[in-house]
Image: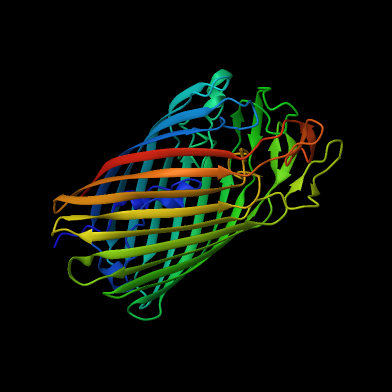
Amino acid sequence: MQRLGATVLGVVFAVPSAWAADMPTKAPPAAPAEVVREASNVQFASEARYYSWKGDRGSPPNFNGAPGSGSQWYVPFALQVTGKPVDVVKAQFLVRSGWVRSSQTTPGQSGTVETITDTVLSGSWTYLGIGGVQPFVALSVNAPTGKSALFGTQANARMDPDLVELSTFGEGWNIGPTAGVNIAITGSLMFTASVGYTWRGPFDRERSSAEVNPAVQTATSLDPGDVLTGTLSLGYQDPEWSWNATGTVSEETKTTENGVDLYKAGRRYVASATVARNWPGQWGQTTVNASYAHSNRNEVLFLGAPALIQETVNTNSDLYRVGVQHLFLVDDTLALGPTGSYLHRNNNSYGAGTLQFVPAKERWAVGGLARKALTPNVTFNIRGEYVWVDEDERPASNGQMFSQLANAFVAGSAVPIVSSTGWMVAAGINVSR
C-alpha cells in the first residue's frame, strides 16, 4: 500500500497563529530505529490556499461599524533535502517561502497587499554513532524577502489572524541556532530535549503600535526582542498507536521602537499533544491534537515613565486549541475524511510576533480532507473548511479604551459582540524521490 499519511506541507511549513491547530495533523514522528535507517530523500511541496470571510464589522472591529469582508490567497512552497554525508551523520536542509495576496474590502478599511513572503533557510545535523542517543544541532535563518512596512491603504490588509492565515508579511533577518539530543528509551519511545536562541534583526513598519491614534502611519524602525526557547518532547509509536507531548518555555528580551524601549513580552509557556490511532482495515486513522499557551505579564512603557514597568494586570491572552480528523482508506491510493477544530482566546491581546491587536473570541471550524497517491512518489492533497467566530464585547468608558502597549486609556469606541464567518479551500502536491 502506498503511504498516504506523510505530507511535506505538514512537516516543513510553519503555520502561523491560530491556523496551526486547524491544519490537518502531520503523520506521527518516526520511531527511533526508523530515524536511523532513513535514506537520502528530496521532497518538494506546494499548496494554493484561499480564505474568504465576512462579519458584522471589519478588522480591526473598532474602526467603524460597517460590515466587514476580506480574502487572502497564500501559496507556500518548500524544498527539503535529507541525506547521510557520512554513515554516522544525518543532514537535512530546507528552503521555504511563498506568495500572498491579502485584501480587505470593508467600507472605509479597504486595502490590498501582494508580496513574496520571507524566505527561511534551515539545516540540521544529527549524529548517529552513539547507540540510543542522537545529539543534533540546527540553524534557521529568516531572510527578509517579504514586505514589512505597509503604507496607505495597504495597512488595511492586515486582518485578524484567526480569519486568514497571514496577518504580517515580512520582518527582519533572524538567526536561530538550536542544540539538542534524541534519546531512544525503547524501540518505540523517544525523548527529545533542545535549547535554541533566535537573534531577531530590526525592520521597518508603517506606524507605531503605541500611537494614541492607531490610524497615524508614522515611519518607524522596530527591533524585536531576541528569544531563548527550551523544549522537551516525548514521542511514542507502534503499529496501532502513536502520540507526542511537547512543552516549551520562551524568554524574550526588550523590543525597541526607533531606539526607545517599547515593551518586553512576558515569559511564554506552550504545551501541546497529539494522539493518533490506526484502525484495522479500511477504517484508517483518527488524530486528535490539542495545545495551550500562556504568557506572564509584560513590561510596558507607561506614558511619561522613564523605563519599562511590569503590568499590574496581565493583558496577554491564554489560548486553547483542539482539533480532530479522521481519514478513511478508500483504497490503496486514496484516503479521505472529516476534520474539526475549536479555539478559545480568553482575553484581548496583542500578538507578540506582530504587535497586532487580536480580540478575545471563540472560533469553530469543520471541514474535510482527501489525499490521493498519484504515483509512489507523488501525492495530491485537497481540503476545505467552514469557520465561524464570535468576538467578545469591548466596552469603552467616555470614548476611551485601554491600550496594552501604551498602558493607558486612549481614544476609542465601544465594540459590541462581533460575529464572523469564513471558509477556506486548499489544494497541493507533494513530490519525493
Nearest the eye: 168 or 391: 391
Residue that protrudes farthest toward the bottom in the picture = 186
Q: Position of residue 330 (x, y in %)?
A: 16, 58
Q: Is residue 433 left or right of residue 402?
A: left
Q: Is residue 279 visible?
A: yes
- At a point 32% along the width and 64% down the height, the residue shown is 286
Quarter of the figure that contains the N terminus = bottom left
* Placement of 385 over or under 330, stated as above or below: above
Give the quadrant of residue 115. top left
Q: Is residue 93 visible?
A: no
Give the quadrant of residue 38. bottom left
Q: Position of residue 336 (x, y in %)?
A: 24, 54
* Placement of 201 over or under 34, stated as above or below: above
Q: According to the image, what is the colour scheme of the structure?
A: rainbow
- At a point 78% along the width and 50% down the height, the residue shown is 311
Give the quadrant of residue 384. top left
Nearest the eye: 227 or 429: 429
Q: Is residue 292 left or right of residue 85?
A: right
Q: Position of residue 196 (x, y in %)?
A: 54, 57
* Placement of 184 over or under 375, stated as above or below: below
Q: Position of residue 408 (x, y in %)?
A: 80, 38
- At a point 45% along the width and 60% down the height, the residue shown is 137
- Count of numbered tags: 0
Q: Is residue 196 left or right of residue 42?
A: right
